[in-house]
Amino acid sequence: MPLQESASRKRDKPEDLSGACGSAVMRRILVPTDGSAYSLKAAKYAAKLAQELGSKVSILHISSYHPRVRARELVEEEERAGADILSGTREVFDKASVPVEVMKLEFGHPADIICSVAERGRFDLVVMGEKGNHEIGRFMLGSVTDRVAHHAPCPGLIVR
């Protein structure tokens, strides 16, 4: 499913500070994670931000394996790997004494899922790493991060 411009996105007025989720206050923060050093650094930054602002944080991991086209064993392996990644990211928030909601593993294209979850969950901010596991060798901004930065219904914070 290709990304589409959100109908609720409000970018036509420069003075309008409200995101698609209707608030300039960062009450709800979404932190997508792939377990990479970049995403864990983003999680640490999000934890500090949540402490200072009193925000609620949700963490999300997306698998690009599609359960309908992959063997059940592969899906189960991906679910275990996803649970480990979410657990490792949760530890960042536990160490900072920041409560976190661990969202269920999602399957699909990471950028599409992140934007969809941000809109459905009415998140005020997406905090993510500059690059991910599959993008460490890239010289420019990671492709998932770039797509989310351009298509998310709310502001994004990219942590380097």
Image (cartoon, rainbow, N blue to C red):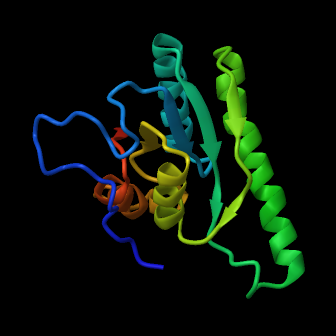
- Observer-nearest of 63 and 160: 63
Residue 137 position, x and y percent, is 41, 61
From where the camera sits, is residue 37 visible?
A: no
How far across and down, in percent of the image, does residue 21 sit? 40, 42
Going 11% across and 44% down the picture, which residue do you hit? 13
Placement of 75 over or under 59, stated as above or below: below
Residue 27 in the image: state x and y as whole percent.
48, 26
Q: Place residue 148 in its image quadrant.
A: bottom left
Residue at 46% across, 63% down:
111
Mark count: 0
The quadrant where residue 25 appears: top left
Q: Nearer the viewer, residue 21 or 1?
A: 21
Q: Residue at x 35, y 46 (%)?
A: 20
Provide residue 69's location: percent of width, then percent of height: 73, 88
Q: Quadrant of the C terminus?
A: top left
Relative placement, left or right, of 37 versus 151 is right
Residue 146 appears in the rendering? yes
Residue farthest left in this picture = 14
| 44 is higher (above) or lower (below) than 108 | above
